[in-house]
Image (spheres, helix red, strand yellow):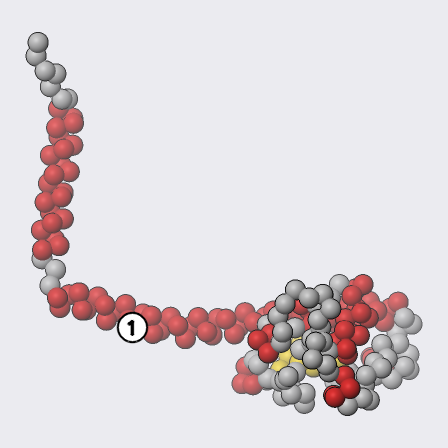
Amino acid sequence: MSLRQPPSSFLSYALIMNARLDRFKAGLAGISILEILLVVSILAIIASLAIPAYGMFRRKAEDAVCMSNLRSLHAGFSSYLQDHAFVWPQNPYANKPDSETQGDETDPEAKWWYEQLKDYGPTRETWLCPSERAGFVEDNDPNHFDMSYVPTSFDETQNRAYFWANQPWLIERGGFHDQGLANLVMPDGSMRKDKSPVPSK
């Protein structure tokens, strides 16, 4: 009884793979320390260029989210005004000192503004700029409120919010974006950047 011979195609494949393995080993043996150091230095240069670029892209993304938040808040205020005879929400905390409006657990003024607009789309997260969130308490407590954007306190005159085209409806606290500037949303919904008169928390 004779043993079956493997097909010629199998032998050819085995010879080819063996030859490739020999070339691979020869290639490894031919790599010098200098070449390895060169590759490592190139990777280090690429990493040093990529890390600042990542930071720049992250700041741009946070700025885009911030402006999107302000547009959502502007849409919420516009809908609120239509439902309330174009009278701006009258903030009961407008003339109170910060010591009376800010507690350890939550900001009552932030909660009040959230309550005014919650039926028009903005959520708790909408009131927070991603660039400033590190300064706030991040948790899942539904009773905790903070805000990065300060609404203008218009009086109760009808259409008062539309009287001045250059008076922003909301101003971002601090200056977390380009050259330390803050985002502002105008009565017509357009966005501007300027120095904020309201410091960050």
The amino acid pointed to by label 1 is Ile
Q: Nearer the viewer, residue 107 or 165?
A: 107
Q: Residue 140 vs residue 100: left or right?
A: left
State the image coordinates of residue 198 (x, y, percent, origin top left): 68, 87
Q: Quadrant of residue 161?
A: bottom right
Picture quarter with the N terminus:
top left
Tell me if residue 83 can be seen.
Answer: yes
Q: Is residue 98 above or below residue 130?
A: below
Q: Nearer the viewer, residue 135 or 85?
A: 135
Residue drawn where x is 21% and y is 66% of the image: 39
Q: Quadrant of residue 132?
A: bottom right
Q: How many marks?
A: 1
Tell me if residue 169 can be seen.
Answer: no
Residue drawn where x is 42% and y is 72% of the image: 53
Picture quarter with the C terminus:
bottom right
Q: Residue 132 vs residue 94: left or right?
A: left
Q: Residue furthest top?
A: 1
Residue drawn where x is 69% and y is 80% of the image: 104
State the image coordinates of residue 20 (x, y, percent, origin top left): 14, 43
Q: Residue 92 vs residue 66: left or right?
A: right
Q: Residue 30 vs residue 52: left or right?
A: left
Q: Quadrant of residue 157?
A: bottom right
Circle 1 residues within 10 Å: few <14, some 14–19, many ≥20: few
Q: Is residue 106 above or below residue 11?
A: below
State the image coordinates of residue 80 (x, y, percent, origin top left): 84, 69
State the image coordinates of residue 82 (x, y, percent, origin top left): 87, 68
Circle 1: element type: helix
Q: Residue furthest front?
A: 104
Circle 1 residue:
45
Q: Nearer the viewer, residue 132 or 75?
A: 132
